[in-house]
């Protein structure tokens, strides 16, 4: 099995401020899920990338899914090899033999009582041909049978792991796409804040020229303008790097020129209770089913190890014609039944049992861990959903109040009642409120995506959870 993981984590996202009012989730992508095979030339690309197209491309080209798809082919091949031990094996042979034999060299001695008469020590050369078909069949071999069942279970486990990998790819691509949307929204907000800071600076410069305000007011407004410019540059840089990351996930070249075409606003999560979500997760999660198949495979491997101590029975038969030439040939056949009874193998069977028992114990422990992990993922997604919904409402209210406060402080400044300290503080408050709102919407969308993944149907649930086509 390949390494690598995808998960939603609590960390800073591009453009966050020092505000502690919002949760700041992000998608952590590790291992082969960070790369992909090139899709250029194999799938048309218009330059506009929707979330649906990004997911479809990643499912086809992301190495997290592609690598496991190849592993499935290998596992199926191993199952076929194991099955061949249980199926009839039929072979045909054609041979032509020319032979001369030295009987004396083989230890053959002839003694005749007649003087002067002796048997030849060199026989031949003579020739014969043989055309023959050989059939062998394992009739009873519990070791081979259980090895085949174990290999078949492992092949099925690999198939389920591919389905789970596709869910992880959807989470990786969907989360990165949502981050791009959030960063793009922050860029738009930063541009608006830059325009406001520039307007304040120009107004303060005019008032300074008229001698109405002090130089400190002008310096303060200029610092605010430069700060907003710096923030915009940082966000634009983050946006470009996120585009590169998304390109790597979806099979696009790192230098691809494209734009995201979807904007995913805040929408309510589908009405599903925690108990229903957990029940669906235990019924649908492919990684859980894969772990169950691995336990079943380990049980069959243990049975195969036990069967090493049991008798086995096989049949071998052949039929053909042999003679000096076809016209002087005659049919011959052989039928052999073999019972193999293990008596002492130097402790090999006991060693195989110990290995199989240890592997089974490990698979069972992994299965229990996956069950606990699934429940924790569902719970975490629900907690993030609840928190982000509340924070979206708080952030909306904060934007309204911060916008109103900025208008009031600007009016006071324009009237000469106060300096621009309050205006600058109000600008920062509005900037923080906008960032908090964008972070909250992103957190809510990512929580919905994480819940879809936790349930085990991230790909098919995208339209339902994120309201995309």
Image: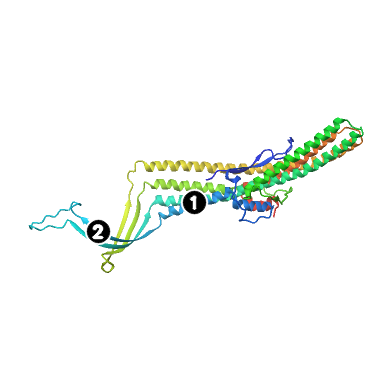
Across and down, in percent, residue 137 comes to: 37, 57
Quadrant in the picture for residue 442: top right
Q: CA distance from mark 1 to mark 2?
A: 46 Å
Quadrant in the picture for residue 383: top right
Q: Answer left or right for 469 relative to 139.
A: right
Q: Answer left or right for 111 relative to 457.
A: left
Which color scheme does this rendered protein use? rainbow
Q: Which mark is residue 99?
A: 2
Crowding at dot 1, Cα within 10 Å, few <14 / some 14-19 / many 20+, comes out as some
Crowding at dot 2, Cα within 10 Å, few <14 / some 14-19 / many 20+, comes out as few
Q: State the residue in front, 404 or 93.
A: 93
Give the total of numbered labels: 2
Across and down, in percent, residue 31 comes to: 58, 43
Q: Answer left or right for 352 relative to 344.
A: right
Which marked residue is nearer to the observer: mark 1 or mark 2?
2
Q: Which residue is mark 1?
A: 74
Quadrant in the picture for residue 206: top right
Across and down, in percent, residue 45 comes to: 66, 55
Q: Is residue 90 above or below residue 178?
A: below
The residue that appears at 41% across and 43% down in the rendered structure is: 352
Q: State the residue in front, 202 or 32.
A: 202
Q: Secondary structure at mark 1?
A: helix
The residue that appears at 70% across and 48% down in the rendered structure is: 269
The answer to whether residue 304 shows anywhere in this view is: yes
The residue that appears at 41% across and 51% down in the rendered structure is: 144
Q: Secondary structure at mark 2?
A: strand
The answer to whether residue 285 shows anywhere in this view is: no
Between disc 1 and disc 2, whose residue precedes?
1
Q: Answer left or right for 125 relative to 17.
A: left
Q: Quadrant of the C terminus?
A: bottom right
């Amino acid at each position: 099995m390949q390494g690598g993981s995808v998960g939603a984590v609590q960390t800073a996202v591009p453009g966050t401020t020092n505000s502690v009012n919002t949760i700041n989730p992000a998608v952590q992508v590790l291992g082969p899920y960070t790369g992909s095979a090139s899709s250029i030339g194999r799938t048309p690309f218009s330059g506009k990338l929707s979330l649906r197209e990004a997911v479809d491309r990643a499912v086809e080209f992301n190495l997290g899914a592609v690598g496991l798809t190849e592993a499935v082919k290998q596992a199926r091949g191993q199952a076929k090899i194991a099955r061949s031990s249980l199926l009839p094996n039929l072979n045909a042979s054609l041979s032509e033999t020319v032979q001369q034999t030295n009987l004396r060299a083989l230890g053959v001695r002839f003694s005749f009582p007649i003087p002067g008469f002796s048997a030849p020590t060199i026989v031949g050369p003579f020739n014969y041909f043989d055309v023959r078909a050989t059939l062998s069949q394992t009739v009873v071999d519990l070791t081979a049978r259980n090895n085949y069942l174990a290999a078949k279970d492992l092949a099925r486990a690999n198939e389920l792991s591919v389905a789970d990998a596709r869910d992880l790819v959807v989470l990786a691509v969907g989360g990165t796409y949502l981050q791009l949307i959030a960063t793009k929204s922050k860029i738009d907000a930063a541009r608006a804040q830059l325009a406001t800071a520039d307007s304040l600076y120009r107004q303060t410069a005019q008032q300074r020229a008229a001698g109405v305000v002090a130089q400190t007011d002008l310096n303060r407004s200029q610092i605010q303008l430069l700060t907003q410019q710096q923030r915009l540059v940082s966000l634009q840089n983050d946006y470009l790097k996120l585009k590169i990351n998304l390109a790597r996930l979806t099979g696009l070249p790192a230098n691809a020129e494209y734009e995201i075409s979807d904007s995913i606003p805040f929408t309510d999560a589908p009405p599903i209770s925690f108990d229903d979500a957990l029940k669906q997760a235990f019924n649908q999660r492919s990684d859980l089913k894969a772990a169950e198949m691995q336990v079943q495979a380990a049980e069959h491997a243990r049975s195969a190890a036990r069967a090493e101590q049991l008798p086995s029975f096989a049949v071998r038969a052949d039929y053909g014609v042999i003679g000096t030439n076809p016209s002087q040939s005659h049919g011959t056949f052989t039928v052999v039944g073999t019972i193999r009874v293990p008596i002492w193998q130097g402790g090999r069977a006991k060693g195989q049992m110990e290995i199989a028992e240890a592997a089974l114990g490990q698979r069972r422990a992994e299965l229990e861990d996956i069950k606990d992990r699934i429940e924790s993922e569902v719970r975490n997604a629900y907690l993030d959903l609840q928190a982000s919904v509340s924070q979206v409402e708080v952030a909306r209210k904060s934007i309204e109040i911060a916008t109103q406060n900025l208008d009031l402080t600007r009016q006071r400044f324009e009237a000469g009642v106060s300096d621009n300290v309050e205006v600058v503080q109000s600008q920062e408050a509005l900037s923080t409120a906008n960032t908090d709102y964008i972070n909250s919407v992103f957190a809510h969308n990512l929580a919905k995506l994480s819940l879809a993944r936790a349930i085990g149907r991230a790909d098919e649930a995208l339209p339902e959870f994120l309201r995309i086509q």
